[in-house]
Image (spheres, rainbow, N blue to C red):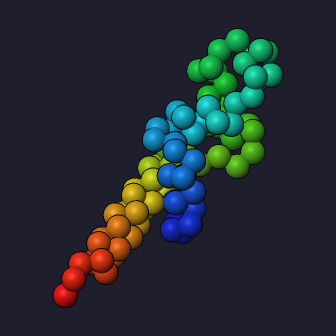
Amino acid sequence: ITLERGLKVLKNSFCYYEDYLDSKITPTDLFYLKSRELARELVEYSHKGMILSREEFEERKAAAEAAKTEQSSVFYSRSRPV
């Protein structure tokens, strides 16, 4: 897992894995499939290209949040008078 990829997941504001899957679903998919759940399953099983598994998504999200926390801690420590 790279920090850059983890931050990208967070930047795209995918708080939940389902939101990430939904971002890969098109209106055409929904038109033909008639079910968001079925569309998510097809996306999750990689029928629409390279998709993160739930575990990979959670790992990258955690890495991004940790990096964000670390970055804000560094900024805070630099801004405090000595």
User: Residue at position x 54%, y 34% from top?
Assistant: 19
Residue 34 placed where, x, y %? Answer: 70, 12
The answer to whether residue 80 is left or right of residue 17 is left
48 vs 31, nearest the viewer:
31
Percent position of residue 38, x then y: 64, 21
Most extreme residue toward the left is 82
Q: Is residue 66 left or right of residue 15?
A: left
Q: Looking at the image, can residue 53 be seen?
A: yes
Instruction: Check the image and report above or below for 69 versus 19.
Output: below
In the rendered image of this protein, does residue 51 appear above or below residue 69? Answer: above
Q: For this rendering, which residue is in front, 41 or 32?
A: 32
Exactly how many numbered labels are in the figure?
0
Q: Position of residue 43 (x, y in %)?
A: 67, 35
- Residue 81 sits in quarter: bottom left
Q: Quadrant of the C terminus?
A: bottom left
Residue 59 in view (yes/no): no
Instruction: Report the residue that reaches farthest toward the front.
Output: 81
Q: Residue at x 50, y 39 (%)?
A: 17
Q: Residue at x 30, y 77 (%)?
A: 79
- Farthest bottom residue? 82
